[in-house]
Amino acid sequence: MWADDARRMREIGLSLVRIGEFAWSRIEPEPGHFDWDWLDRAIETLASEGLSIVLCTPTATPPKWLVDQMPDMVAVDKHGRPRGFGSRRHYCFSHLGYRAESRRISTALAERYGRHPSITGWQTDNEFGCHDTVLSFSDSAAAGFRIWLQEKYRTIEALNEAWGNVFWSMEYRSFDEVDPPNLTVTEANPAHWLDYRRFASDEVVSFNREQVDILRAHSPERDITHNFMGFFTDFDHHALGRDLDVAAWDSYPLGFLEQFWFAETTKCDYARQGHPDIAAFHHDLYRGAAPSGRWAVMEQQPGPVNWARFNPAPLNGMVALWTLEAYAHGAEFVSYFRWRQAPFAQEQMHAGLLRPDSTEAEAASEAREAADALKRLGEAEAPVAPAAIVFAYEAAWVCNIQPQGETFNYLELVFDWYSALRRKGLDVDIVSPDADLSAYEMVFVPTLPILPDGFVEKLAAIKGPVLIGPRTGSKTESFSIPQDLAPGRVRDLIPVTVTRVESLRPAIEEGGEDWSVIRWCEDVQTRAKAEFSGRRKAVVFNRDRVRYVAGWPDQGLLDKLITKMAKEARVELIPMKKGLRLRRTANHIFAFNYSDAALNAAGLGSGAPVIGETIIPAAGFTVWRRR
Ligand code: GAL
């Protein structure tokens, strides 16, 4: 089938193919015995059609013989159960023997194919952390954690002091006594958890880096990438991204809508399109993940998937829309998962561009349509957006370790703020706290419980309006309440002190007629001006261009705050009709219709559209040249 496949790929308009991410048992069927023949032929077949290849290290799927050779290489879950063979991702990042195997198989592949002219890139492993695999509680992880702690704290007294281990007699006499924080009677010390999460994240980063170093040595001038996931924060993607040339991610808008926190009505409204901000949120997040700003979609949903609670089919048009939207946000490529629906094993119900019988599935013609459109548009450049949202993986860990109210979900908070900006027609960059913020007109910090050194100074230097969210500055580096209370050094920007916090069950809120704070509400002592007050207390404070919101703002309050800030920053807002989204590149303006009915986009772009019509059909898009 292969020659025919490669020809058909090229004919559809594809130019790049990712292969080999789970192929270890075929590359090395017996320990030390490599079978390269099939992979040589696969690469030559694709190359002869002019397709470039992203080759993968196969470490997400260690073969059975390897697991049998060292049974303790598997990850251990939080209940202390080893994770068995028979699917994927069954390894522990901290197992030194598996680390050596990962280097060995990566070296073998890189030596063989590193300089092949058609291999233009590498993907390390596959979706680090998928199936809840960042945290492992194995003996190897425990041993690695003790070394990590020793390097960080030097003395056990320093660790005891930092964590507050005098509480409940949790003091240790040596690093050897410290275990991972699972299997305790009630919750373990949050400082213990935070360090365990930092350690586990560092393990993923160094696992990846070992492969990157090998690939760079044997395969110069090729791009190195990894495919990150959606709505996933278990390791620090900014830290890992520093070792990559291109940050890629896997986009499954319908699956994500179904699996995550969205309201039932939203799940129904967008069942076949995905929420209009899901894909864009990740595009803008991962554009900020590698220092180069280069990013791509490594897996694009092409039809129904197999893994969500319900798996609807996208509306006709969505696959092309998602592809063009990625491009409009600056993607270097969009790769569809998968080429052909596999008739066997776990993912037999997952759609591809081809059906299992090799006839074209619905998505194939949309991929063709997208390829044609891209040819007409040329290279896209993503200009700096007017608004930046600061995003920190550590913030997600802190909120998760001690939520204090079960609905305080970091990703949801950031997504709400992002969505509010996008509904006003704004382009947004989502950046790490280390990023240069000086070029933005408006900066948003949904929450940053632990303030990194220099961050407050950076905010102070910004000329435009800044919005700082609840719980910012509420913890020290070692997960305690700062001596001068929250928001700690934020006080250099706006004189507020948080004296008490409360979390609220659904339907209890604080606010006015058309706005409220929900889920979380703070009491604040301040000399700053109260800008929004509810029935019982003030919740937004303002000093010059800095605002502090002492609770979880609903969409009504976010709308009002963004409107005020945009006015101060002289940034134009274009309120979007439901389901419509805008995005600008250096040369074009794109409008995407995520609704299931046609929408009139008159006035969004000027002149005649270069692609599409002013009335955008359901699941359609229109592009204008930018003046
Ligand atoms: C991704 C994964 C792929 C495939 C896909 C199914 O998470 O990287 O290998 O499983 O999901 O949607």
Image (cartoon, grey):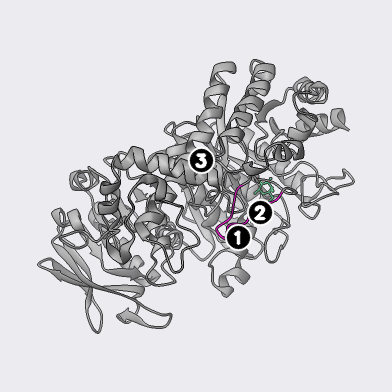
- Between disc 2 and disc 3, the foreground one is 3
**The stretch drawn in magenta includes residue 82:** yes
Mark 2 or mark 1: whose residue is earlier in sequence: 1
- Amino acid at the residue labelled 3: Val
Instruction: Give coordinates of residue 441: x percent, y percent.
Output: 28, 47
Mark number for residue 204? 3
Q: Is residue 48 left or right of residue 144?
A: right
Magenta-drawn stretch, dominant element (helix, strand or loop): loop
Mark 1 or mark 3: whose residue is earlier in sequence: 3
Q: Is residue 410 left or right of residue 50?
A: left
Looking at the image, which residue is at 14% across and 53% down?
Answer: 492
Looking at the image, which residue is at 38% across and 71% down?
Answer: 554
Count of labels shown?
Answer: 3
Instruction: Work out whether 313 lies above or below 427.
Output: below
How packed is label 3: few (under 14 Cα within 10 Å), some, or many (20 or more)? Answer: many
**The stretch drawn in magenta includes residue 72:** no
| SS assignment at label 2 | helix
Q: Are marks 2 and 1 in contact (CB under 8 Å)?
A: yes
The residue identified by callout 2 is 318
Range of magenta residues: 75-84
Q: Nearer the viewer, residue 492 or 194?
A: 194
User: Quick one: quadrant of the N terminus?
Assistant: top right
Cβ of mark 1 under 8 A from ligand 1: no
Instruction: Give coordinates of residue 527: x percent, y percent.
Output: 9, 67
The residue identified by callout 1 is 274
Mark number for residue 155? none
For the residues labelled 2 and 1, the Cα–Cα distance comes to 9 Å
Residue 293 appears in the rendering:
yes
Q: In which quarter of the image is residue 170?
A: bottom left
Looking at the image, which residue is at 29% across and 63% down?
Answer: 471
- Amino acid at the residue labelled 1: Gly
